[in-house]
Image: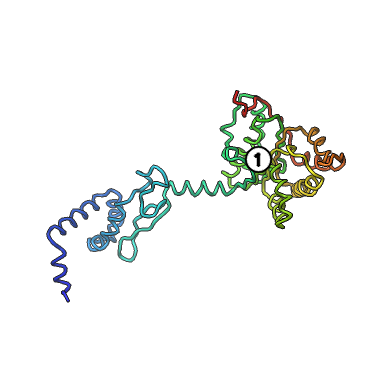
Amino acid sequence: MERINETLKRVITPEFSSRLDDMKREVLENPDIQKFLEENAATISKKIVDRSLSKLYEYKSQTHHCESCQSLELCSNYMKGYEPRLVLDRNLIALEYVRCNRGVIEDERRKVTSMIDSIHMPKEVMEAHLAGVDLEDGSRVVAVRAAKDFLNEWERTSVLPSKGLYIYGKFGVGKSYLLGALANELAARHIHSVVVYVPEFLREMKQAIQDQSLAEKIEFVKRAPVLMLDDIGAETMSSWTRDEILGTILHYRMSEQLPTFLTSNFNYDELEHHLSFTQRGEKEVVKAGRIMERIRALTIPISLQGKNWRDKK
């Protein structure tokens, strides 16, 4: 068996020693490493530096402050989304890995995204922002101002206003977009909202009876810190979906004073008329009035006008 001294003589050739010296010089010329050594000069000796050379080289070989990374996906560091930091650990120089700037931004983005639960809503709506709302039409200015008033009230008091908005207008004027934009503004403030496309949601509730998830889904929606019901009135309701689903959700939110936003093609009176007729053609004015009583208690009506943005002509 070869002795250790013989092995070292064979391995540490003049060329190896020269490369080691070059590496050490390259490492010690790094401005961040120099700064760390100066700040800890009272503690760090030449022996500590020599024993920690591999860690110093590991530090120097990676990027810092996202200098050369175009995106988090293209991060070149050993741990994607993390950057090394020099620390002293038991008379040695060691590394600890901390979240880089891009990693922190991505974490925040995911946190914001987690603040919104979307049920059957289009992707483009859920990516909306208030800054993207076209303000050429005066009614949009009023709607955006009302949305900002809601946000400002929360920022002033740290309490969500009990009343949301009832945004109504013809097809394609931006009602759903405004809901998505407001949901994203709330998410940026770490306020959880649930955004629901009503016609598809009510169809889902019928199917939920079979898989016994109905009660769970209603509970999830009705208890949302902020609930947004998009396109109410676009469906022909049965007595059951109107009274047992919509009525249950709205009654709970009115009782608990939880902010609720709705969009519709109908104004209050038109929606009440629509809700009066069931799929069977039955006219139930009292029950429709009961639903509208809750909607009026929960919302402030805002008329949204302007051109149809879905019309490409």
Q: Position of residue 296 (x, y in %)?
A: 78, 39
Given residues 137 and 237, the one toward you in this image is: 237
Nearest the eye: 88 or 139: 139
At x 27%, y 55%, the residue is 57
Instruction: Give residue 36's position: percent from left, percent from top.
Output: 31, 54
Q: Residue at x 70, y 44 (%)?
A: 259
Residue 247 left/right relative to 31? right
Q: Depth check: 248 or 131 in front?
A: 248
Which quadrant of the view contains residue 118?
A: top right
Q: Quadrant of the C terminus?
A: top right
Placement of the N terminus among the 4 image quadrants = bottom left
Q: Amino acid at mark 1?
A: Glu
The foreground one among 263 and 302 is 263
Instruction: Please name the colour scheme applied to the rendered image.
Output: rainbow
The residue positioned farthest toward the bottom in the image shown: 1
Q: Is residue 81 above or below residue 150?
A: below
**What residue is disc 1 on?**
153
Residue 12: x and y in percent read 15, 63
Q: Residues within 10 Å of mark 1 (few under 14, many from 20)?
A: few
Element type at mark 1:
helix
Residue 32 vs residue 205: left or right? left
Among the 4 quarters of the image, the one containing residue 303: top right
How far from the left and from the top, in percent, is residue 171?
Answer: 68, 30
Relative to residue 63, is residue 50 drawn left or right? left
